[in-house]
Amino acid sequence: MKVLLLKDPKESDGGPDSYIKEFGSHGLKATLIPVLTFEFISHQTLSEKLFHPDQYRGLIFTSPRAVEAVKLFLMDSCKKEAWKNYLREKWNTKPVYVVGKATAGLVTEIGLKPQGEDCGNAEKLAGFICSHIMLESVTVYQTSQHPDLQESLTNYFSQEGVPASVIFFSPSGVKYCLKQILKLSGDFISQIKFAAIGPTTAEALLTEGILVSCTASRPTPQDLAVELKKCL
């Protein structure tokens, strides 16, 4: 049974994407199509804040890309040395919150100790952190449509046909993909089970009038595969 996942492929220890691997264990042939490209911004602002941990009570990483922005910061040899010598230790005396296991894994790679990974989404994480905490946010990346997206979607439907399910991983995926998927599916659109990685993405689909067959209880390959199997 074929399913289409609208996300970037992620390799783990040189192996296949964790979603491809997990879905395969459930007898599902999954194909990934990248939806977005990312541009990292606010380098100087991020650097200044990371160099002053004493001014903050903790860190919140809202996505894997946010962690990648810090990794980019660490590519500078002087900053990397400062991180190893004292910055990392100072930040580790404070809570470091994340949304989801993928983000938690990347946070661990930079030497920090994540909390809240099982909350699953930002709304639940907010409850985990508790209220009445002043937040200071830094936008460290911006997104745009992947240049090959439209061609990739057309080629997929031409070669593989209409999938049993299309899974969206972000509201941006809904914005950039839904219209063409509806067009490519034609009269067979009713055969597709639309799924979402989380409640925010599900809400974006519902806003477009799309029936959401399932939403992952947590943003992990295992939870998504379990929910999808229930509706297929």
Image (tube, helix red, strand yellow):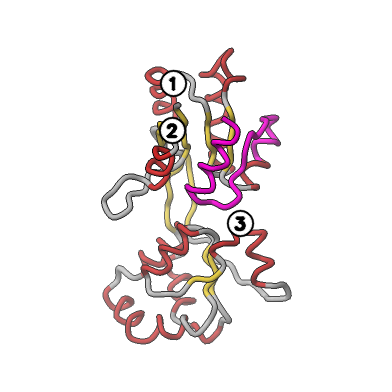
Whichever of callouts 3 and 1 sits on the residue coming sooner in the sequence is 3
Q: CA distance from mark 3 to mark 1?
A: 31 Å
Residue pictured at 47% horizontal, 47% vertical: 221
State which region is magenta. 204-232
Q: Which residue is mark 2?
A: 28
Dot 3: element? loop
Residue 18 picture location, percent across and down: 39, 47
What label does residue 157 carry, if any? 1
> Quadrant where the N terminus lies?
top left
Q: Is residue 226 magenta?
A: yes
* 3 vs 2, front mark: 2
Query: To which quarter of the image does residue 2 belong?
Result: top left
The amino acid marked with disc number 2 is Leu
> Quadrant where the C terminus lies?
top right
Q: Is residue 192 magenta?
A: no
Q: Residue furthest right?
A: 132
Q: Is 110 on the left or on the right of 91, as rendered? A: left
Q: Which residue is mark 3?
A: 121
CA neighbours of label 2 inside 10 A, class few (<14), some (14 to 19), many (20+)? some
CA neighbours of label 3 inside 10 A, class few (<14), some (14 to 19), many (20+)? many
Q: Nearer the viewer, residue 103 or 135?
A: 103
The amino acid marked with disc number 3 is Asn
Judge whether 77 appears above or below 38 on screen.
Answer: below
CA neighbours of label 1 inside 10 A, class few (<14), some (14 to 19), many (20+)? some
The amino acid marked with disc number 1 is Phe
